[in-house]
Amino acid sequence: MSREHLAADDRSRGPRPDSSRDRHKVLEAVAGRARAGSRPGARDDGMRLALVIEGGGMRGTLSAGMALALHEAGVVDAFDAVYGSSAGAITGAWLLSGTPEQLNGWAEPEYANAMIRLSNFWRGRPVVDVRTLVEHLYAEVARMDFDAVLSHPVEYHPLATDAHTGLSTDLRPYLGGPADLRLALRASAALPFLAGPAVELGGRHFYDAGLAESVPYRTALAQGATHVLVLRSRPAPQDVLPVPAAEAVVRPSYGSRLVAATALRRYPKALHDSYFARAHRQREDEALLSEYDRGGPPGRDGAAVMSIRPALDAPRVGRLTRDGKLLKAALEAGRAAVGRTLRLPSA
């Protein structure tokens, strides 16, 4: 797959069952830049095109497959910035690392088994060992070129949740070098209870981005993005509430209240409130992103946002999935979703 395939398809597009989706402004922006061979830092088209990557633990294998397909299509340079939450931040880093083919590692059982140790629960240790993943596997085994990520002309924006304010925070201003980048990757995925304590970076403490913004399209828009392509790790829901209905209060689950009373007990109420509001934000995000996919929401910000999602029959991967066969199928399902959307030939 290549950007030439994308450009050629854009020129020859004919009537299709999903032609309205094909004409989405985000796809037009990606295809136009691919045709022109546009490079980050040397553009004058007035657009700011952002790639947003959802996480979700090992469910992020699906969005990792999508990111891998964008690399294989040769269109990564069409973007000005990459935003990632939790596992999506890790995928974004690999995408800009100089060796994005390492995204295949999401489907390797060794990767999952090194990071997820269910027996750690009984030892009082994090079930998801993000520290070992980043500081050992990424630094010494499947080595990530952290300098390449930091120097890439496409801006890298990992997100996390400020443990004291409960606010979604772009960690890019804290990235002074490779050590800071490793801390940012750990902070973005530091899920309370499952993945250990908050991570300190720049004198602040941060938890998993998903506590405040699991799909970081809002941050991308707030920072001036005019076009946003969102890589989702969840299939589209069967029923999407309209925005006013989605804004209804969702009562926190018993599990959420338990985590707040234990793992988060030392932190201010603002963090607890943000954590409790996750289900509400997810419903609102589904409603808003569905409107954006249809070319709206009209009258809000004028930006174009489009989501690529796994097919409804894509493998169901959980946050703690370690089955190699299932993860491989999920990675391929993510690649296939991008191929269908961009109309790329099968590999």
Image (cartoon, grey):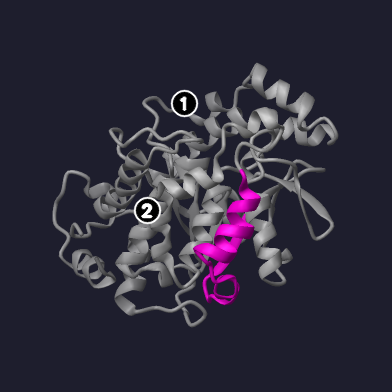
Q: Amino acid at mark 1?
A: Leu
For the image, the number of numbered tags is: 2
Looking at the rendered structure, the secondary structure element under dot 1 is loop
Based on the picture, tell me whether residue 148 belongs to the magenta stretch. yes
- Answer above or below: position of 40 versus 210: below
Which sits in the foreground, 330 or 241?
A: 330
- Answer above or below: position of 235 versus 90: above
- Please report the residue visible at 56 percent of the width from the left and 61 percent of the height from the top: 138
Question: Which residue, given by chain and number where applicable, does mark 1 sit on?
Answer: 241
Query: Percent x, y for residue 59?
Result: 45, 40
- Answer above or below: position of 231 versus 318: below
Say if residue 252 shows up in the picture. Answer: no
User: Is 302 on the left-hand or right-hand side of 9?
Assistant: right
Secondary structure, magenta segment, majority class: helix
Question: Which residue, given by chain and number where applicable, does mark 2 sit on?
Answer: 66
Looking at the rendered structure, the secondary structure element under dot 2 is helix
Based on the picture, tell me whether residue 142 belongs to the magenta stretch. yes
Q: First in sequence, mark 2 or 1: give its number.
A: 2
Query: Percent x, y for residue 301?
Result: 55, 51
User: Is 26 on the left-hand or right-hand side of 22?
Assistant: right
Residues at marks 2 and 1, CA–CA distance in whole angstroms: 26 Å
Which sits in the foreground, 60 or 130?
A: 130
